[in-house]
């Protein structure tokens, strides 16, 4: 479908290649144990996971900053399950979460298989809204950093997906053309619509059970990329 025209493939990282939810759960398990936070991890994650996505949306839209994101997602989750916790402990947990998160290296199913398949044929890159100090360690610790020519993050660009400037910076750094580039990501707004607005092709990796749409092809397993490239 795309194979004749594509030269560069840009991947999102979290929820697309790197198994954010699994690694995040392992991180909370560790830091709650160390801080003696006695809550049900499953009960906490049940409210935290959707809250985290909602706060990231606010962060993308510049309605909150990094510090507020890191504090509010924890504060709101603890409040939602009725667990009393003071701001000092939240700050400790927030810092510990960032420190420990990238130490876990679980990838989504078939990540290495599809990267091995694509690497000989295309130039591969990352475009992520994640924080620079964390994303670099995720790539290194999960042993996939070597697959990518360029890694562009929102702190480097000064803007976040779906802002066109981050995609334009990625094209510039990769020395690529938008009409010969494919964006693969899990977020319709940030990855798919953001990339298409700049002229990219797009593949939606449906990590969140989003409903069907007409924006681009939707896949549910990374191996499905082979059907199009």
Image (cartoon, rainbow, N blue to C red):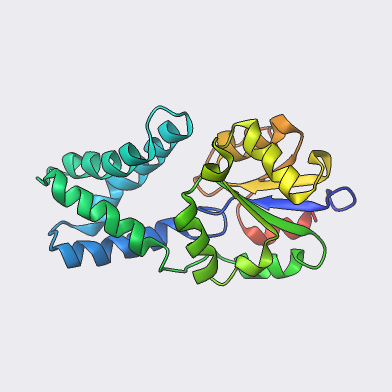
Depth check: 202 or 155 in front?
A: 155
Of 211 and 108, the residue lying toward us: 108
Residue 43 seen in this snapshot: no
Residue 73 is situated, as x and y percent measured from the top left of the image, at 29, 42
Which residue is the extreme one toward the right?
A: 4
Where is residue 23, by image quadrant?
Answer: bottom left
Residue sitting at 72 percent across and 48 percent down?
173
Residue 25's spot in the image, x, y percent?
Answer: 33, 60
Q: Residue at x 52, y 60 (%)?
A: 136
Question: Against 201, is 89 above or below?
Answer: below
Residue at image point 31% right, 37% down: 68
Q: Quadrant of residue 145?
A: bottom right
Query: How many labels sit on residues?
Result: 0
Horizontal placement of 180 versus 81: left or right?
right
Q: Residue 36 placed where, x, y %?
A: 12, 63
Please identify the quadrant where the C terminus is shown: bottom right
Q: Is residue 108 left or right of residue 27?
A: right
Residue 10 location, x and y as percent? 69, 50
> In the figure, 158 relative to 93: above or below?
above
The correct choice, above or below, for 83 with respect to 29 in the image is above
Q: Residue at x 55, y 41 (%)?
A: 187
Res 176 visible: yes
The quarter of the displayed image where residue 218 is located: top right
């Amino acid at each position: 479908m795309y194979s004749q025209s594509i030269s560069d493939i840009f991947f999102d990282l979290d929820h697309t290649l790197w198994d954010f939810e699994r690694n995040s759960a392992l991180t909370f398990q560790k830091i709650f144990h160390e801080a003696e936070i006695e809550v049900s991890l499953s009960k906490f994650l049940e409210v935290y996971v959707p809250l985290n996505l909602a706060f990231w949306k606010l962060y993308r839209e510049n309605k909150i900053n990094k510090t507020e994101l890191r504090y509010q997602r924890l504060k709101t989750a603890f409040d939602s399950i009725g667990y009393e916790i003071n701001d000092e402990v939240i700050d400790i947990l927030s810092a510990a979460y960032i420190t420990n998160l990238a130490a876990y290296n679980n990838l989504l199913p078939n990540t290495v298989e599809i990267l091995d398949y694509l690497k000989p044929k295309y130039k591969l890159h990352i475009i992520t809204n994640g924080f620079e100090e964390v994303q670099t360690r995720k790539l290194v610790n999960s042993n996939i950093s070597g697959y990518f020519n360029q890694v562009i993050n929102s702190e480097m660009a000064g803007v976040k997906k779906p802002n066109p400037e981050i995609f334009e910076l990625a094209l510039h750094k990769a020395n690529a053309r938008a009409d010969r580039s494919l964006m693969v990501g899990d977020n319709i707004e940030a990855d798919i619509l953001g990339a298409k607005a700049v002229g990219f092709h797009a593949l939606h990796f449906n990590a969140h059970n989003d409903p069907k749409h007409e924006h681009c092809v939707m896949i549910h397993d990374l191996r499905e990329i082979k059907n199009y490239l």
